[in-house]
Structures are given as C-alpha cells and as structure tokens.
Image (spheres, grey):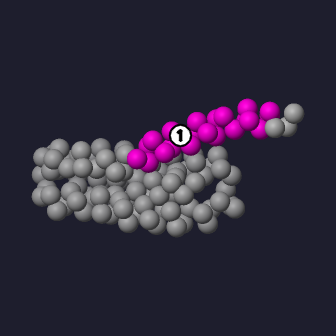
Amino acid sequence: MQDADARVGSAPVIAAAILLMTVLGSLYSWSVFILPLEDSLQVPRADVSLIFSFATLTFTMGMLVAPLLFPRLSPARLALGIAALAGLGHLLAASPAFELVLLGYGGFFGLANGAGYSI
C-alpha cells in the first residue's frame, strides 16, 4: 500500500521537475533575444553577449552551490527559493537598463538556472 501512496505523492514532484527543466532550457534560447536586446538597450553585440556569458558563469556557480543547500533546506523551500530568484532575475531583466539586465538575467536568473538544474 505504501508504494501506491508514494506514486500518488510523487506526481506533483514529477510535474514540477518537468516544468523546471522546461524553464531551464530558456537560458539557452538566448540567441533569439540578441537583436531585440541590441535595439532596446542601445548597446553593441559584445555587451549583449556579455549578459549570456555572465549567465553561463552564474549557472555554473549555481550548480556548484545548490547541492550544499540540499541537507539544509527541504526540497519545497529550495525550489521556492530558486523560483523566487529566477522571478527576480526576470523582473530586473525587463528593465531598459543594460546593468539591470546583466544583473537580473546574467546574475540572478543564471544562478537560479544552475541551482535548479542541479536538483
């Protein structure tokens, strides 16, 4: 009977993992945003590419740091924290200021992606 309960209880976890992996893939769709960001931020391609480079660096940091939090936080709290960090990153990335896009998408969203991926 416990096995049936475990399967029913794992459905939300599996659904959350699928949703998380879908969101994580958005980091690698960066190339879709290059031209619109160049226009809206009024910066050269090198600066726009810096945002993705920084996101890749923070992604790596998130993958390395998140496992240290596994014994300290419940999976629900960890996932909620990662989702909040990703949301904050997107909120900042919606700004027309290059620095906020760099911090939001490159910093917070990249870190959240790496942390989520390690889960």
Q: Relative to residue 64, is residue 96 depicted above or below? A: above
Quarter of the figure with the N terminus = top right
Residue at image coords 58%, 36%: 15
* Viewer-nearest residue: 111 or 28: 28
Residue 89 in view of the camera: no
Left or right: 30 in relation to 12: left
Whether the magenta-drawn stretch holds residue 23 is answered as yes
Residue 104 in view of the camera: yes
Q: Residues within 10 Å of mark 1 (few under 14, many from 20)?
A: few
Whether the magenta-drawn stretch holds residue 87 is answered as no
Q: Relative to residue 35, is residue 61 depicted above or below? A: below
Secondary structure that dominates the magenta span: helix
Residue at image coords 24%, 49%: 31
Quarter of the figure with the C terminus = bottom right
* Residue 71: % across, % down: 69, 62
* Residue 73: % across, % down: 67, 56
Q: Relative to residue 18, is residue 86 depicted above or below? A: below
Span colored in magenta: 4-25
Q: Amino acid at mark 1?
A: Ile
Q: Residue furthest right?
A: 1
Left or right: 34 in relation to 54: left
